[in-house]
Image (cartoon, rainbow, N blue to C red):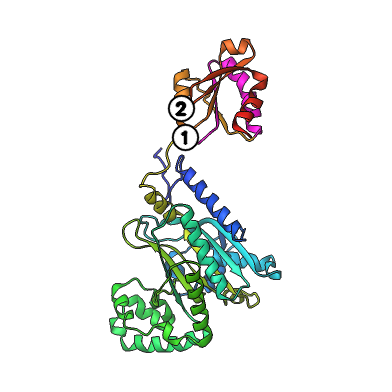
Amino acid sequence: MKHVTAPRGTFDVLPPESAEWQELERVIDEVCTRFGYQEIRTPIFESTDVFVKPIGEGTDIVDKEMYTFTDRGGRSITLRPELTAPVVRAVLEHNLLQTLPLKLYYRGPIFRYERPQKGRYRQAHQWGVECFGAAGPEADAEIIALGIEVMKAIGITDYRLEINSLGCDACRHTYREALVGFLRNNADRLSETSRERLERNPLRILDSKEQRDIDLLNLAPTMDAFLCQACQEHFATLRTLLERMGIRALHNPHIVRGLDYYTRTVFEISSTALGAQNSVCGGGRYDGLVKSMGGPPTAGVGLAMGMDRMLMLARSAKGGEAHNGRPRVDVVFVALDEASALTLVPVMHAVRARHISADMDYTRRHIDKQLRAAGDSGARYAVIVGEDERHSAEATIQDLATRERSRIALEGVVGELAVRLRT
């Protein structure tokens, strides 16, 4: 039988690289909890309706990238391409908006059918935060600061924060008319895809990656010239807050993000650590999303970061090497024969019950090889039992740093290790 391989655009996370993922998840948990956010977990697949209206017809995600299928009950199901809409669905389904603000964070896989490339996969991994019920720029600043704090915590210091305002429904309507007028006057300079969007969803043209569209858009009117007074004040206050927090933000009037539900603040964090400018994080405010999904009018703001690309950047910051070596343990148990192994297993179990990390090489290689592997694992001590120790109901404890050895009664091993490791 031919070997079966992982589908294109997916990958396996293997030891010891999985330790890097665990560390990133630990950092996310710690920072989000410190900022007052609680974890939420939603299903990997949802009803297709959860995504089509919030994300927007005419977007690349809906038109080209979603994994959608009909299940055996005839229902249209989609593997989630992002997590904000599923979180809103869960919030409404379980009536979580009774107490505001509501601050949630998440992490998990997302699925998009696109050409696989470095740091971008068909099954990618994403973490993010959502804050519901806070309409002011303070929440926007907090969300941005949280994302930067996670990046710093894993060693990413080469980054660029760019922000923009898309305005509210009122001022965006005025801008839309001006933009459509400009684009229709220059329709012959647009790409074929953008000419189609001009009739269906003209604001999506702002997100085009076609160079001819980008060149034309550089001449088009920008949203900042059409912001109403309230939106101008919101954006100005956000910039002031970020400056006072020591966070440098560049105003980029061309940032629009790829989803229809954004209002007012949008932002992106990118880095050149991997060569070309790569987006690591994106987010913004979506004050109309909850209402559009059947809920009450509720302000919202959030961000999402690609975990795959974050780990690549973190690795680059550390010199380009992946995590290596065996898992870190405090104590390694070394049995020199089968009977000694049977003696040591219950002792090792008791040590683990004291929250001391411990391991044993069940292959019973030569003692020198076992001790060398123990040192490589970062263990502090080795507990050795052979025929001699077994007959005297003792064990040899070796300090792997000084190589000093001492004999101790088997029944006292757990307490001795607890004292030495101060657990």
Q: Compare marks 2 and 1 and give the one earlier in the sequence.
A: 1
| Image coords of residue 249 (percent x, y) | 43, 70
Q: Label 1 near label 2: C-beta < 8 Å?
A: yes
Q: Tag 1: Cα neighbours inside 10 Å, few (<14), some, or many (≥20)? A: some
Element type at mark 1: loop
State which region is magenta: 328-354
Q: Amino acid at mark 1?
A: Arg
| Image coords of residue 43 (percent x, y) | 59, 58
In depth, the one of 172 and 80 nearer the eye is: 172
Q: Would you say 7 lies left or right of 214 here?
A: right
Q: Looking at the image, is 240 positioned above or below residue 392?
A: below
Cα–Cα gap, marks 2 and 1: 9 Å
Q: Which mark is residue 326?
A: 1
Can the viewer see residue 77?
A: no
| Image coords of residue 41 (percent x, y) | 60, 57
Q: Amino acid at mark 2?
A: Ala
Q: Would you say 97 lies left or right of 379 here?
A: right
Q: Looking at the image, is 138 positioned above or below residue 413?
A: below
In magenta stretch: residue 348: yes
Q: Tag 2: Cα neighbours inside 10 Å, few (<14), some, or many (≥20)? A: some
In magenta stretch: residue 61: no
| Image coords of residue 115 (percent x, y) | 36, 59
What residue appears at the point 58 percent right and 60 percent down from the top-left corner? 105
Q: Quadrant of residue 358?
A: top right
What residue appears at the point 60 percent right and 57 percent down from the top-left corner? 34
Element type at mark 2: helix
In depth, the one of 63 and 222 nearer the eye is: 222
The residue pinned by badge 2 equals 373
Q: Quadrant of the N terminus?
A: top left
Q: Quadrant of residue 346?
A: top right
Q: Looking at the image, is 34 positioned above or below residue 329?
A: below
